[in-house]
Amino acid sequence: MPLTISGLSKTYPNGVKALRNVSLTIGNTMFGLLGPNGAGKSTLMRTVATLQDPDAGSVDLDGLDVLARKTEVRKILGYLPQEFGVYPRISAQDMLLHLAVMKGITKSGERKEVVDALLRQTNLWEVRKKSLATYSGGMKQRFGIAQALLGKPKLIIVDEPTAGLDPAERNRFLNLLSSIAADVTVILSTHIVEDVRELCPRMAIIANGSVLVEGSPAEALEAIRGKIWSRVVSSDDELRALEGSMQIISTHLIGGQHEVRVHADASPGDGFRPSDSELEDVYFLSLARHSNN
């Protein structure tokens, strides 16, 4: 189900410009919205999810005016916000049954069948009768996906879903998202580059409310292929000297030493070696270019 976002702008009463003329086209795929905290991702997701209005612009979901026909949009939308509240003493099964009624699944037999299927799909069947207060972070996120899938939505929005999850829980959650994306359009909003790299055929990078990059990760990587150079430095003084003489796009600690990564058409100097381009390079390079404009 294609989603077209055109010219969205939003300025909050405190003067923060959260969105600046944002336009995106999202097809039937897993789409990654990548950006740092405060980039405007959550504002954009809340707008698409019909939870707030922009100052200007439009959102079209397969011919449906999202801003004007919110009730109709909500019937085909699943949403997992960055933070969502649940009744902690209620079991996952009972909570889903309650939410299913709110989603319009009024027949008890159908409701039980739908909820049981979702609990199995999200691997929560064995703990379905436990209270949500006892769930781990990953289990709560899988419950969040289960509630988002109620009513067979055609568009699912997930906002920062893996933040705070341990590696095993993150892998389970990403595998679940991947299986869901085979049937519906999913927008994954995150600041974690690896999530987009592993899941998304299409993506956009956003910062300060503006879209910096839109396309496929493969296209973005191809654009900088052969232009990433790396060098390991042994001291903070050496690192500061390099920072003063060239534009470093990122640094990583490896065995207590700094690996410096630089974008350049040719070798930046002694000690630098060509390095395979990574999506993280695209991300940091885009942010660096934006901050210098």
Image: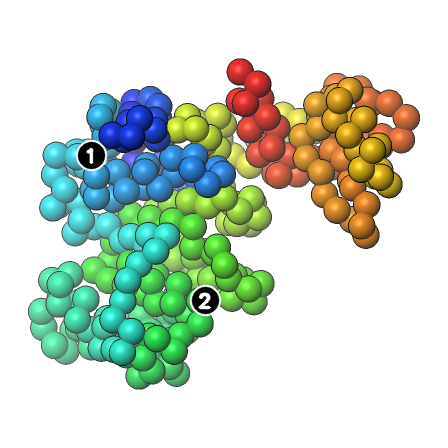
Q: What residue does disc 2 label?
A: 138
Q: In this rendering, would 257 be left or right of 252? A: right
User: Quadrant of the image for the N terminus?
Assistant: top left
Location of residue 191 in the rendering, given as x and y in whole percent from the top left corner: 50, 44
- Please say which color scheme the image uses: rainbow
How many neighbours does mark 2 have within 10 angstroms: few (below 14), some (14-19), or many (20 or more)?
many
Secondary structure of residue under mark 2? helix
Q: Residue at x 24, y 50 (%)?
A: 77
Quadrant hosting residue 146 = bottom left
Q: What residue does disc 1 label?
A: 53
CB-based contact (under 8 Å), mark 1 and mark 2: no
Q: Which comes sooner in the sequence, label 1 or label 2?
A: 1
Amino acid of disc 1: Asp
Any part of residue 170 in sight: yes
Query: Which residue is at the front of the view, 48 or 65?
Result: 48
How many neighbours does mark 1 have within 10 angstroms: few (below 14), some (14-19), or many (20 or more)?
many
Q: Residue at x 79, y 26 (%)?
A: 242
Tell me if residue 223 comes above or below residue 258 in the rendering. above
Location of residue 276 in the rendering, given as x and y in whole percent from the top left corner: 74, 37
Quadrant hosting residue 104 = bottom left
Location of residue 16 in the rendering, given as x and y in whole percent from the top left corner: 34, 29
Q: Residue at x 32, y 38 (%)?
A: 43
Tell me if residue 131 comes above or below residue 214 in the rendering. below
Q: In this rendering, would 271 be left or right of 137? A: right
Q: In this rendering, would 282 be left or right of 72? A: right
Query: Which residue is at the front of the view, 196 or 293?
Result: 293
